[in-house]
Image (cartoon, grey):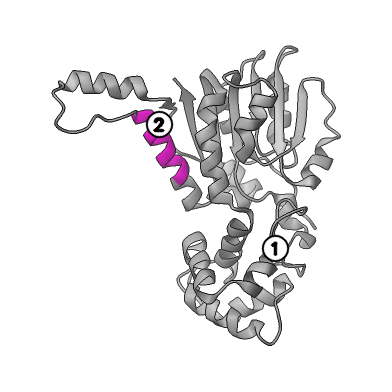
Amino acid sequence: MAQLHFPVMLQEALDGLNIKPDGIYLDGTFGRGGHSRAILEKLGEQGHLYALDRDAQAIEAGRELEDTRFSLFQLTFSRLGEFCEQQDLVGRLDGILLDIGVSSPQLDDPERGFSFDKDGPLDMRMDRSSGRTAADLVNTLPKSELARIFKEYGEERFASKVAAAIVHDREQTPFSSTLQLAGLMERVIPTSREHKHKATRCFQALRIAVNGELDELQSVLKQSVSVLRSGGRICVITFHSLEDRIVKNYFKQASMGQSTPAGLPLTYAQTERIRLSTATLRLIGGPLKAQPAELSQNVRSRSATLRVAERL
């Protein structure tokens, strides 16, 4: 049975957005609309929520949300700047919410190929209308590139060993299903003390590679500042250390501003004024994790981290 869909860190995200009833907000990862519905509950008649998702199934599910204050578009969030220009939203958004990664409905549907719990096609594309599938990658990439993906995106200790086994086995039988690939990883990866399926890290790495998730995240962060109004906030929920590191570093750099080259005849006060005048974001608190009450309902929230920043 499919797991119920719980919007991750819902209250923390709402608090982070600091929603104004007449504000304009954007949910860049609609999913099944849990966060969007909660935002709409806090908006007044003059408020508006825009939502994006690149998954056609998410868009279809969102059609049942009929509200004149709500607009839903099938679009990847890396095109945020372009979208806001088209909608005349540049510099007008009061808040942006991004819930990075795969949603529970995607994980629970064997036909999507994200999970190794049930057999399904080795797909993993969030937008199934375009792009290369996970099967395309494991059946065509050289051993060195597969090893890089597993090590860099999945932090898999035995990345080279898994890549070598894939290249060896695919010569006889190309990979086409999730259980076929998971079975290889069960065989190749040594048993550890971690309470994780042996395929967890490699499947995660393939999903990130298939969807270009880290590049997408870096792109949307760079575009976010220009579309927020002064005092507008961006909230990002990540589920992976690499994703969180990208958000953390971007927020930190944007909040510190531009440093002056060493050796210039400037006082400390002058360099601080330059630095502060070029900062674009202010950090709102530190990283937040899901609370015990939420963890008891939704185990998938255990790896979630929320970070919030405000445009200066």
Residue 148: tell me if it is visible: yes
Locate residue 213, reporting x and y percent.
58, 50
The amino acid on which the numbered mark 2 sits, given as a three-letter code, is Ala
- Element carrying mark 2: helix
Disc 1 packing (10 Å; few <14; some 14–19; many ≥20): many
Q: Which of the two discs, 1 and 2, labels the residue nearer the N terminus?
A: 1
The answer to whether one can see residue 291 in this image is no
Q: Which residues are magenta?
A: 246-256
Q: Was residue 255 drawn as part of the magenta stretch in this picture? A: yes
The picture quadrant where one finds residue 142 is bottom right
SS of the residue under disc 1? loop
Image quarter hosting the C terminus: top left
- Asked if the residue under mark 2 is in contact with the one under mark 1, i.e. CB atoms within 8 Å, the reply is no
**Residue at position x 67%, y 30% from top?**
83
| Residue for badge 1 | 133
Q: Is residue 303 above or below residue 48?
A: below
Disc 1 and disc 2: Cα gap in Å?
Answer: 35 Å
Residue at horizontal 74%, vertical 30%? 37
Magenta segment includes 168: no
The location of residue 306, given as percent across then percent down, is: 52, 38
Q: Nearer the viewer, residue 309 or 272?
A: 272
Q: Quadrant of residue 202?
A: bottom right
Q: Is residue 140 left or right of residue 309?
A: right
In the displayed structure, does residue 87 sit left or right of residue 13? Answer: right
The amino acid beneath tag 1 is: Thr
The residue at which mark 2 appears reads as: 254
Image coords of residue 1 (percent x, y) = 80, 58
- Above or below residue 312? Residue 121 is below
Report x, y in % for residue 27: 66, 32
> Neighbour class for label 2 at 10 Å: few (<14), some, many (≥20)?
some
